Image (cartoon, grey):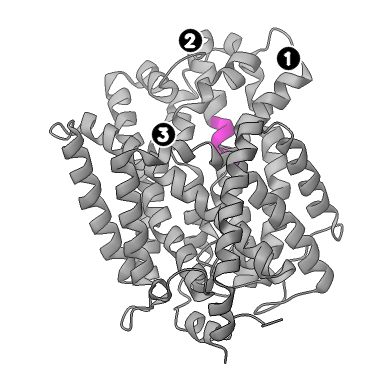
Amino acid sequence: MSQRATIESSLVRDVGVWGLAASVVNLVIGGGIFRIPSDPAVAGLLGAAAPLAYLICAVAMGLVVLSMAEAGSRVSMTGGPYAYVETAFGPYAGFLVGVLVWTIGATAVPAVAMIFADNFAVVVPGFQSEAGRIGLLVAVYAVLVWINVRGVKQGTRLIAAATVVKLLPLVLLVAIGAFGMHAPYLTPAAMPPKHDFARAAMVLVFVFAGFESALVPSGEVRESSRTVPRALLLGMGMVTVLFIALQFVVQGILGPRLVGSATPLSDAAATVMGPWGARLFSLAVVFSTFGFLSGMALAMPRALFAFARDGYAPRALASVHRRFHTPHVAIVAQAALTVVLAATDAFERLVVLANLAALLAYLGCTAAAFELHRRDVRADGEPFRLPGRNLIPVAAGILVIVLLSSITIREWRFAGLVLAVASLVFVSTRRGRVDRGLTSPT
């Protein structure tokens, strides 16, 4: 058995369908849904027709999700998209996609951490100062590290609980709000032009993003050939139905007041539930962002672990706890990095990378799904097979390329810098990887 396989085999495969589906739901429902219904590109351009943009986006993202479902059923190593692309196209392409996926987490998580701290300070007085918020984050991440080091099962249970808690107020708003809608608010005066739907769908792509990070701990998933596709389809199906229902209900309650609202869900809840509804959604933001942080505390350290396992990062990050069988050093390192970036605000210069990084990672995964299907690569069982042979990955790839056409020159420059640094790391670590038998000398 190779050194890489030995390290990977020391992990415990404790994540099942419901645990992975909860992680998908948890990471997709972060903080965006509390703001996106009133976005000028959604409610402003489309008004009552906005739910149709969600359907368009859901179909588009569904093609990407289906492609990842097949790729995930064929590759079961830690790293998720990183492992899929590496298996299909080799170490260099895989490493670049791995860096892109990790970059999404490295930029988004500190930002959400500060959103969590800011909203927590509103709900619980005494944390308004900068020192108070940083102290809160240190305490929260100490707890998350303790839970995740003790086992992937414990981390998954925390995510499942956080997912249920964050879903409750959203489902409650849909259920109660359905009786407070006004029919005129739900009838478009005229159907918006196609380009307005396209622009809104472009914005909504990133509301549906996040599921790729849930796939990073693939080395701890039971029967990945069955679990990954089922969990992805289940989780994304639930999110799609919920997002469309929320947009429909909020539009029906607020009507013209929806456009420009900074807190559309809270405003809708206050309208149909009274002041306690608004307070409920202040808490909901705290719970939702905490759930996102919990999910990323499970997923992102596995990316560092995969880099170290393959010789791209210090070997210590690939250490596995002897008792709990978790990548404990990577968990601590990722948590420390998140708190430091949140405290220094250094992450803000990199946030622009998140959208482009996600699209490039999706493009790599759709191409990998095509190649893995063509070669009939198999992991631990009969893989999930898409209908129409390879038509779905091709369609998904074309869609992503169309979306990439909207990226600005500045964003491409930032992405080019990140990929250049990643390429330098790949080249500079090659000798060490050859010496450890992690790559071929030729």
Disc 1 or disc 3, which is closer to the eye?
A: 1
Q: Give the Cα separation between the discs numbered 1 and 3.
A: 30 Å
**Residue found 56% across the figure and 51% down from its top:** 211
Instruction: Pinpoint residue 429: horizontal percent, then vertical percent.
Output: 54, 71
Q: Could you say which quadrant of the image residue 409 lies in?
A: top right
- Three-letter amino acid code at disc 3? Leu
Label 1 SS = loop
- Three-letter amino acid code at disc 1? Pro
Query: Along the polypeptide, which appears first: circle 2 or circle 1?
Result: 1
The label shown at residue 77 is: none
Using the image as rendered, state which of residue 113 and residue 186 is in the foreground.
113
- Three-letter amino acid code at disc 2? Arg
Q: Which residue is mark 3?
A: 172
From which residue to which does the magenta span run? 240-245
Label 3 SS = helix
Query: Along the polypeptide, which appears first: circle 1 or circle 3?
Result: 3
**Residue found 42% across the figure and 19% down from its top:** 262
Q: Give the Cα separation between the discs numbered 2 and 1.
A: 19 Å
Q: Which residue is mark 1?
A: 192
| Position of 335 relative to 237 (above/below) | below
Q: Could you say which quadrant of the image residue 398 lies in?
A: top right
Query: How many C-alpha atoms fall within 10 Å of the one at disc 2: few (<14), some, or many (≥20)?
Result: some
The label shown at residue 257 is: 2
Main secondary structure type of the part rendered in magenta? helix
